[in-house]
Each structure stands twice: as structure tokens, then as C-alpha cells.
Image (spheres, rainbow, N blue to C red):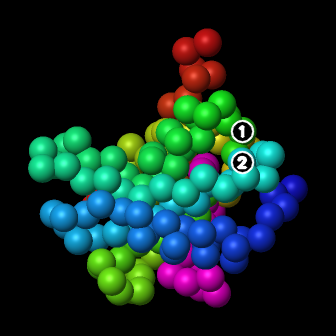
């Protein structure tokens, strides 16, 4: 069954979250909006670092904010990215590390929305973006 939520609203929240990104190096701002099973939205932006590898993606910022506040069940995440001060030109797909972090918490109904705008987005399951992924069930 499809998860019930307003995808356009979540896309809008992801676009808004780009404003919180800290991107002095790439100038590429990503925003993520994570919808919890309880109906709350956690937003996050990418946070870059002079030691590039210490950079945190927008998706993980949002997920870690939520998990650190006790949320563990999520319905969807919307993602939007583009050059600083510009509207997205392309869909911003989550990197491999973020897909793996989603795998830790995503249930069957979890959806990933990549948005260029509130009216132009695509919806995926995690299985589509991370087929044959490694999860906790493999080591329990
Ligand atoms: N970035 C994200 O925030 N999410 C992704 O899934 C891919 C990449 C960020 C990291 C870095 O700050 C910038 O985009 C360029 O790689």
C-alpha cells in the first residue's frame, strides 16, 4: 500500500531545507525533509568541512536529527539539490552512504522523493535505489 502523505509538501520542505546547508566548498546545496511515522517533518542540509571527508549529507543530517530525538520509524524522505542560490536543475539522488543509512530505518512503505520543485518530483522505494542491500536482518 502506498504511504499516505502529501508528497508536494514534503518536496517543498526539502527545497526550503537547502537554505540551511553549509556549503563553502562545493556551493552545491542539498535539502532533505524526513517524514516520521508520527507525521513530523525533520529537515536537514548538507554540512561541509574543510576536511572534505568530514562532510555530512543533507539526508543523514535529517535522519540523525530525528533518530537522536527518539524517532525511528519513517514514511518518506524528500531530497532537493542544486547550486547555491539557484533552483534545482536535476533530480538529486541520494549517495550510496545515505542509501545505506536509510536501509537501517526504512520499512517496506518507505518512499524516497527526488524533487526539482513541489510540482516536479519522482518517487522510489529503497529497494529500487539499493537493490540487494545489506541490512540488520543479515546479522541478527
Ligand atoms: N550531498 C548531499 O548532501 N547528499 C547526497 O546524497 C549527495 C551529496 C552533498 C555533499 C556535499 O556537500 C555536496 O553535496 C557535493 O557533493
Span highlighted in magenta in the image = 112-127
Spatial separation of the CA atoms under disc 1 and disc 2: 6 Å
Quadrant location of the C terminus in the rendered image: top right
Is disc 1 in contact with disc 2, using a CB cutoff of under 8 Å? yes
| Residue 95 numbered tag | none
Give whichever of discs 1 and 2 has the lower sequence position: 2
Quick one: label 2, few (<14), some, or many (20+) residues within 10 Å? some
- Judged left or right of residue 119, residue 80 is left
Q: Is residue 92 above or below residue 83?
A: above
Q: Is residue 111 above or below residue 26?
A: above
Quarter of image, ligand 1: bottom left
Quadrant in the picture for residue 18: bottom left
Which residue was labeled with disc 2? Answer: 36
Which residue was labeled with disc 1? Answer: 73
Q: Residue furthest left?
A: 50
> How far from the left and from the top, in percent, is residue 83?
30, 79
- Judged left or right of residue 75, residue 44 is left
55 in magenta: no
Amino acid at each position: 500500500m502506498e504511504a499516505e502523505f502529501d508528497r508536494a509538501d514534503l518536496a517543498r520542505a526539502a527545497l526550503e531545507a537547502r537554505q540551511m546547508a553549509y556549503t563553502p566548498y562545493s556551493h552545491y546545496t542539498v535539502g532533505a525533509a524526513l517524514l516520521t511515522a508520527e507525521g513530523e517533518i525533520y529537515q536537514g542540509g548538507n554540512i561541509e568541512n574543510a576536511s572534505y571527508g568530514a562532510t555530512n549529507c543533507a539526508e543523514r543530517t535529517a535522519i540523525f536529527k530525528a533518530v537522536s530525538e527518539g524517532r525511528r520509524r519513517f514514511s518518506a524522505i524528500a531530497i532537493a539539490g542544486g547550486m547555491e542560490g539557484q533552483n534545482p536543475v536535476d533530480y538529486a539522488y541520494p549517495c550510496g552512504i545515505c542509501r545505506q543509512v536509510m536501509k537501517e530505518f526504512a520499512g517496506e512503505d518507505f518512499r524516497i522523493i527526488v524533487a526539482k520543485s513541489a510540482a516536479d518530483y519522482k518517487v522510489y522505494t529503497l529497494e529500487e535505489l539499493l537493490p540487494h542491500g545489506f541490512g540488520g536482518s543479515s546479522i541478527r
